[in-house]
Amino acid sequence: MSRQVLGIVHQAHSSPGQVGVVLKQLGVRLHLRRPVLGQGIPRDLGRYDGLIVFGGPMSANDPLPGLAFEMRLIERWLHTEKPLWGICLGAQLMTRVLGGAVSSHPDARVEIGWYPVCALGPGRAVFRGLGHVYQWHREGFELPDGAHRLASAPKDADFYEQAFAVGRSALATQFHPEMHPRMMRRWLGRAGEMLVLPGARPEAEHLQGNQRYFAKQARWLHNALDRWMDGRLVE
């Protein structure tokens, strides 16, 4: 029987991007659900071998019933010790579940585009070979109690915290490893007005970074998801 992963997305048109591509390559079935749009999830969560909570345009602090449901799901999943991955909004929801804060930059700066990331401690094995990552967010998270910092931005960056782990099976990444070129073009087309916000990279740098960094990020993601599915991403 093939392995199965439950994926939580936040818009009607949301795509799992490169994560979906890699899971298919690994023979893993991905089932997407949209709680913020009123879509329920299967009662039998035991059938799933992993949970991925993707990003979205809302704030983790928004009082939305769907987000409250997702946080209860994350809390429940953490007790199973099965693989869990929170991406951007998903990472911020994990932070809130663990008692940490999510907030915007004091000067309303953002990260939109390709940015450097620094692996730290046990994260050096997790993020080996990954130097730049794709970002699209207005808010960031603090490191929650009990979590292990795996990656940060450079010290002078606008959003320092970039990745943490809880135990061996739960990973949170502020950046978007699911980004692929088609997704980038769709985001730029639908929300390109955000590129005028302070801290955002101009469109040309998005496209140049795609040529420089996407292939490396995609190779890393394939290895990372393979290890994550086996519960050995963080060792």
Image: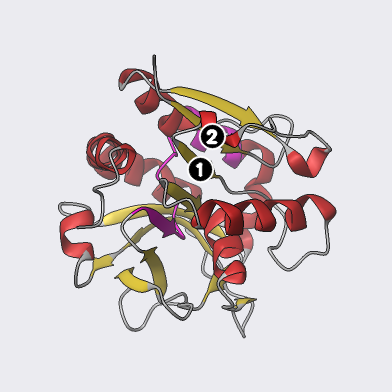
Q: Where is residue 125 in the image (x, y as percent from the top left)?
A: 16, 57
- Relative to 73, residue 161 above or below: below
- Relative to 21, residue 137 above or below: below
What amino acid is labelled 1 in the image?
Answer: Ile
Point out the tag, 2 or 1, that comes first from the N-terminus: 2
| 150 with respect to 34 (left or right) | left
Residue located beneath label 2 in the image: 46
**Label pair 2/1, CB-CB below 8 angstroms:** no
Q: Regarding mark 1 in the picture, which secondary structure is present there? A: strand
- Relative to 124, residue 51 above or below: above
Start and end of the magenta stretch? 169-188
Q: Where is residue 221 in the image (x, y as percent from the top left)?
A: 30, 39
Whether residue 23 can be seen here: yes
Residue located beneath label 1 in the image: 52
State yes or no: residue 123 in magenta: no
The N terminus sits in image quarter: top left
- Which residue is rendered at x = 69% and y = 42% of the image? 10
- Relative to 120, residue 26 above or below: above
- Which residue is rendered at x = 54% and y = 71% of the image? 140
